């Protein structure tokens, strides 16, 4: 009985043991979390111009705010010990989870996909981040976009994005998640190219769309292969009595809910025994697939291919090597868009995907090594590029790519809780940094060159204070805040990992991560010092900057506060399962329990546990000294060394390195030379030779030309004179008679 219903029948203290909310009602109401921003998008898009700016602002903010309130209620409900989700795949209910199947979405032959939503501790954290940060950015946008003529279109796109991101987060199956995955990509394209009258901004939107399509194609192929994998697993386990009987209920669930639900996939892999302990005839990861398109490959090899294709999709959506090139150009859109989509939410979709399917990832050491190495390489590569960027938003864009690399390092080595913890803290401090950059631009005539700013701390105190707090949070120099603890959790978890068959990977990833952490403190220190400290640049567009109004500064203050207080979730203040755990690790243990169980059974990865608080203090101290070194180096160079050498020639090697970093190590030009130009050449040849010459000229116009010429000759035979026709007929009869006579005489 829910708490408030209990109060009508018993005393307050007697009702304390009852759940706060009606969990069945919350499960059935999950659709409202998506429906509210979707309704806001429809109203803003269809009626926004008629309703006016103030009403459109109210509708858009209220839609996301309402979604946040419902997400918060669902968060409270899913934390109750009585919160369970019964799935058709197993008799054992899923604890600390809620969900509801709203019916069949589509069915094609034996394949079925349901419209089902589910909420557990992982998706609850994501829903709060998306709606909470999204609401603050909507409020910020009411002032930032206050003079834009397309305000109604902007808020329609922004509301639609929130709805699609929530669909991705709450989906209980891969097909429905893919709808949200594609939806956020569409909204990203619309918002990057929001000012489409500017050709450069429209081009940036198209570039993001095309690069993401490459990754999404990999994701789609991965889903197809996974469907075949499930079908092969179903068919071969039927022949082995032990596995067959255990999976009877799972098969019934597949028929009812489809092969690509997360609960169904998790239940399937739980029935795969490790090869050394498997009974003769049982299906293991080393068992060859004996029928279908995957015939000849083992179940483990096919699963690795699926995960690598998912990684291709994640590399596109989360801007990892080699598909990161779209994100820096995405800064062409409005700054609040960069804060919401390209820092806090959409770009973390790949991290969420692998955290959601962690029970599959831990079965493939090859895939885990690939994900971790790509993340580590991206983290360092993007941080080095950020060194030389002078555009304030470009610095933050490459910073985002680098921080996402840290998250992929964590999921690649099975430290899923640390990845989600960094995802949440990153949403707070990076949204604060982007919105702070927007405030700086707003108060300085849209200036984005950090070398033409300077001295803003005295003229923009609220923006400067919140930017400083967020900068400390991401780097950890001066005072360790939330980002320091989440990043250290990743580095420590990576260093303590042992990946079967790839013993060198954790060490390599950890070393790259340490260098990237040092670089993070350096480039963010450089950014803050050049923008807010020192003297006002004589090249600035305006003599004096002005502080932003409260709809812009209030979200900055709240996000800065969250960047501070979120550090609590990184402290090991809970003792559970015989060891000290951080709040976030303990909270997400309900989701990571199955992946950790599979890690132990299949012995793919092992993570050494932290012995106690002293071990934590040691890792924190090491990480803090690295962050401090990066921050001090930035201070030394930009407060003393470079100012003292103003006017002196720079070393040629330094200029060359700076030029390479400023141009992103020419990755874009490399892609243009190796991919874009050859494709354009092939397209030109196909157009000129195949399309224009063969098809248009020979087959289409050539056929018409021949027909016209033949008709021109034939028309001389069609005079319309009856006497001529009679003469021709008589001549034909005469000739036929003569031919017949000759044949008879022969």
Image (cartoon, helix red, strand yellow):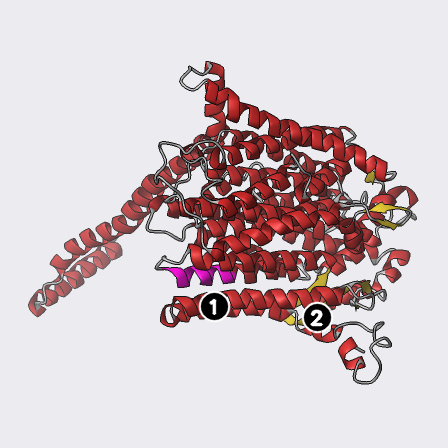
Seen as rendered, the residue at the extreme bottom is: 9
Looking at the rendered structure, the secondary structure element under dot 1 is helix
The segment highlighted magenta reads: 150-160
State which quadrant residue 684 falls in.
Answer: top left
Residue 215 appears in the rendering: no
Identify which residue, 114 or 25, lies in the foreground.
25
Q: Where is residue 483 drawn, in percent x and y?
A: 66, 42
Which class describes the residues within 10 Å of circle 2: few (<14), some (14-19), or many (20+)? many
Residue 60 appears in the rendering: yes
Q: Where is residue 76 drawn, in percent x and y?
A: 73, 65
Identify which residue, 710 or 398, lies in the foreground.
398
Q: How many marks?
A: 2
Q: Looking at the image, is 144 positioned above or below residue 31?
A: above
Is 260 positioned to the left or the right of 2 in the image?
A: left
What residue is shown at x 74% (from left), y 49% (from top)? 569
Is 74 positioned to the left or the right of 648 in the image?
A: right
Residue that carries the numbered disc 1 in the rendered image: 58
Identify which residue, 204 or 576, lies in the foreground.
576
Looking at the rendered structure, the secondary structure element under dot 2 is strand
Q: Where is residue 399 drawn, in percent x and y?
A: 56, 38
Residues at circles 1 and 2 in contact by the CB criterion of under 8 Å:
no
Per the rendering, the mark at residue 100 is 2
Identify which residue, 175 or 129, lies in the foreground.
129
Residue 374 magenta-highlighted: no
Which is the main secondary structure of the residues drawn in magenta?
helix
State which quadrant residue 683 falls in.
Answer: top left
Q: Return the disc, 1 or 2, that comes first in the chain's sequence.
A: 1
């Amino acid at each position: 009985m829910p708490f408030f219903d209990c109060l009508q029948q018993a005393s307050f203290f007697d009702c304390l043991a009852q759940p706060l909310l009606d969990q069945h009602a919350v499960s059935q109401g999950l659709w409202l979390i998506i429906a509210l921003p979707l309704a806001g998008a429809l109203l803003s898009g269809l009626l926004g111009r008629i309703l006016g700016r103030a009403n459109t602002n109210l509708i858009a903010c209220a839609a996301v705010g309402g979604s946040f309130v419902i997400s918060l209620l669902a968060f409270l409900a899913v934390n109750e010990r009585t919160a369970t989700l019964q799935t058709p795949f197993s008799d054992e209910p899923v604890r600390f989870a809620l969900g509801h199947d709203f019916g069949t979405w589509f069915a094609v032959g034996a394949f079925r996909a349901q419209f089902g939503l589910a909420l557990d501790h992982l998706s609850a954290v994501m829903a709060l981040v998306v709606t909470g940060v999204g609401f603050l950015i909507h409020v910020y946008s009411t002032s930032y976009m206050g003079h834009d003529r397309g305000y109604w279109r902007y808020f329609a796109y922004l509301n639609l994005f929130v709805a699609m991101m929530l669909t991705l987060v709450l989906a209980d199956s891969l097909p429905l998640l893919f709808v949200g995955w594609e939806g956020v990509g569409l909204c990203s394209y619309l918002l990057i190219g929001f000012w489409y009258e500017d050709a450069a901004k429209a081009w940036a939107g198209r570039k993001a769309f095309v690069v993401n399509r490459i990754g999404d194609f990999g994701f789609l192929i991965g889903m197809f292969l996974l469907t075949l994998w499930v079908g092969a697993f179903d068919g071969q386990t039927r022949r082995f009595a032990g596995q067959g009987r255990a999976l009877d209920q799972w098969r019934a669930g597949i028929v009812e809910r489809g092969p690509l639900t997360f609960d169904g996939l998790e239940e399937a892999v739980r029935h795969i025994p490790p090869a050394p302990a498997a009974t003769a005839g049982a299906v293991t990861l080393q068992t060859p697939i004996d029928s279908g398109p995957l015939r000849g490959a083992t179940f483990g090899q096919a699963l690795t291919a699926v995960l690598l294709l998912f990684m291709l999709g994640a590399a596109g959506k989360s801007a990892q090597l080699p598909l990161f090139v779209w994100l820096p150009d995405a800064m062409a859109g409005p700054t609040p868009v960069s804060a919401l989509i390209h820092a806090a939410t959409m770009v973390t979709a790949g991290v969420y995907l692998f955290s959601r399917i962690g029970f599959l990832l831990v079965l493939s050491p090859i895939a885990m090594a690939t994900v971790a190495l790509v993340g580590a390489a991206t983290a360092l590569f993007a941080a080095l590029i950020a060194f030389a960027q002078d555009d304030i938003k470009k610095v933050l864009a490459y910073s985002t790519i680098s921080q996402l690399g840290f998250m992929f390092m964590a999921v690649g080595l099975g430290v899923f809780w640390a990845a989600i913890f960094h995802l949440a803290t990153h949403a707070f401090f990076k949204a604060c940094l982007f919105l702070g950059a927007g405030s700086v631009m707003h108060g300085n005539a849209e200036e984005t060159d950090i070398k033409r700013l300077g001295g803003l701390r005295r003229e923009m105190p609220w923006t400067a204070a919140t930017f400083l707090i967020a900068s400390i949070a991401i780097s950890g120099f001066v005072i360790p805040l939330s980002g320091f603890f989440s990043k250290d959790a990743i580095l420590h978890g990576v260093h303590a990992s042992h990946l079967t068959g790839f013993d060198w990977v954790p060490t390599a990833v950890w070393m790259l991560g340490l260098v990237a952490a040092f670089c993070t403190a350096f480039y963010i220190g450089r950014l803050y010092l050049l923008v807010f400290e020192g003297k006002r640049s004589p090249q600035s567009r305006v003599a004096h900057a002005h502080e932003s109004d409260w709809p812009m500064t209030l979200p900055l203050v709240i996000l800065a506060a969250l960047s501070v207080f979120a550090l609590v979730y990184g402290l090991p203040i809970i003792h559970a399962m015989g060891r000290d755990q951080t709040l976030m690790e303990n909270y997400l243990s309900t989701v990571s329990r199955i992946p950790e169980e599979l890690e132990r059974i299949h012995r793919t990865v092992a993570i050494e546990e932290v012995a106690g608080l002293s071990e934590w203090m040691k890792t924190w101290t090491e990480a803090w000294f690295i962050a401090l070194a990066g921050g001090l180096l930035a201070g030394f160079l930009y407060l003393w060394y470079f100012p003292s050498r103003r006017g002196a020639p720079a070393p040629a090697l330094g200029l060359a390195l700076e030029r390479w970093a400023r141009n992103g190590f020419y990755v874009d030009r490399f892609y243009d030379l190796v991919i874009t130009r050859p494709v354009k050449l092939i397209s030109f040849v196909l157009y000129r030779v195949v399309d224009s010459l063969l098809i248009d000229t020979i087959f289409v116009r050539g056929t018409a030309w021949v027909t016209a010429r033949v008709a021109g000759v034939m028309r001389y035979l069609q005079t319309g004179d009856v006497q001529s026709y009679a003469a021709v007929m008589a001549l034909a009869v005469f000739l036929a008679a003569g031919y017949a006579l000759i044949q008879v005489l022969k």
